[in-house]
Image (cartoon, rainbow, N blue to C red):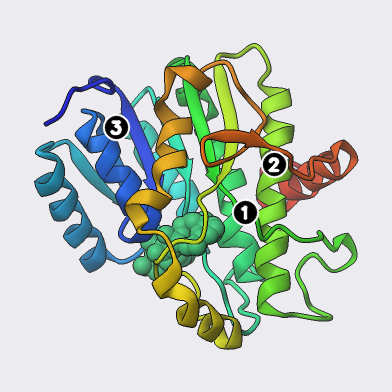
Amino acid sequence: MQSAPLAGKICIVTGANSGIGKAAATQFAKMGATTIIVCRNEQKGVAAQDEIMSLSGNKSVELMLADLSSLDSVRKLAAGYRQKHDKLHVLVNNAAVVEGRRVVTKDGLEEVFVVNYLSQFLLTNLLLDVLKAASPSRVVNVASSVHAHIDFDDLQMEKRYNAIKSYGQSKLAQILFTQELAERLSGSGLTVNCIHPGAVRTHLGDEGGLVGIGIRLLRPFYLSPEKGAETLVYVATSPEVKEITGKYFYKRKVKPAPFNKEESTRLWNISMKLSGLGN
Ligand SMILES: NC(=O)c1ccc[n+]([C@@H]2O[C@H](COP(=O)([O-])OP(=O)(O)OC[C@H]3O[C@@H](n4cnc5c(N)ncnc54)[C@H](OP(=O)(O)O)[C@@H]3O)[C@@H](O)[C@H]2O)c1
């Protein structure tokens, strides 16, 4: 194992059986962290756990199974974590999907909105006390430069759905969530930032219909997952950013992002209701 700046620390990465999440989890494990990978598919999860342990030489890699399209599964994930651990140093909300057609979850919500945003809102809020207990601690939300408009009149896209609109809305929701949560946590020692990884060669878009075909055609020109994880790992671990919160990073630098206080508060209030956290 290389030098161990994260020895004694615990990091969770969602969607860590492939792509950017697996590359980031491998880096955390190499840095000595107890690394918890959250995956929905047991077979893929076990394969990733074995690979991360072997690449990092760190045996402290745990697999937790959760389907992040189900709010009940997110609640069970948070409860399961809290049963075993009383501290969490880094939470990386990374899992995401692109869907070519509108899929409704068992909670009656649009799937991309839930996996890419609402599950992260719920999971983060349910883990806030263990994150604060590990202060200084960090939440990193893996967003995207493809962050579009939020349609508050049709948040679940019942009237009009398309893959780019739903993905872009979910990614802007993450950015607004980052801003709102950072403000609410001001002075707590827990920072919240989001990142754009760049265009990265992963499985994202495999279910994306026509959009997915476009993504696949361009893949040879994209970054490797390891390169794509660099900004994420930097924001999650570097002492250089320990005081920075509520920001959007790309290529390890803070970049302008469409932060909007009115929209972030509105989205927070809606998300409290939809996630069952509040009225
Ligand atoms: N690739 C890019 O160019 C790019 C650009 C900008 C932003 N991003 C962002 O980077 C992040 C990582 O994506 P990636 O590119 O590495 O794609 P990826 O290889 O497809 O990884 C996505 C991960 O999310 C998991 N996931 C999807 N639905 C889930 C669910 N319901 N429950 C639990 N896990 C679920 C996937 O698991 P399965 O294997 O089981 O499907 C997979 O592990 C995403 O937030 C994405 O929006 C990527």
Q: Residue at x 66, y 32 (%)?
A: 247
Query: In this view of the protein, can residue 39 be seen by the observer?
Result: no
Q: Is mark 1 within 8 Å of ligand 1?
A: no
Judge whether 44 appears above or below 126 on screen: below
The amino acid pointed to by label 3 is Lys
Q: Position of residue 28 (x, y in %)?
A: 29, 35
Q: Nearer the viewer, mark 3 or mark 1?
A: 1
The foreground one among 126 and 35 is: 35
Q: Is mark 3 within 8 Å of ligand 1?
A: no
Answer with left or right where residue 129 lies relative to residue 26.
right
How many residues crowd mark 3 within 10 Å: few (<14), some (14–19), many (20+)? few
Q: Position of residue 195 (x, y in %)?
A: 56, 43
Q: Which mark is residue 223?
A: none
Q: Which mark is residue 117?
A: 1
Quadrant that contains the C terminus: top right
The residues bearing labels 1 and 2 have C-alpha atoms spaced at a distance of 9 Å
Q: Is mark 2 within 8 Å of ligand 1?
A: no
Question: Which residue, as the protein is rendered here, is positioned at the far front?
Answer: 221
Q: Nearer the viewer, mark 2 or mark 3?
A: 2
The residues bearing labels 3 and 1 have C-alpha atoms spaced at a distance of 25 Å
Q: Residue at x 58, y 33 (%)?
A: 253
Q: Secondary structure at mark 3?
A: helix
Residue assigned mark 2: 177
Residue assigned mark 3: 84
The amino acid pointed to by label 2 is Phe
Judge whether 203 appears above or below 64 on screen: below
CB within 8 Å, label 1 to label 2 = yes
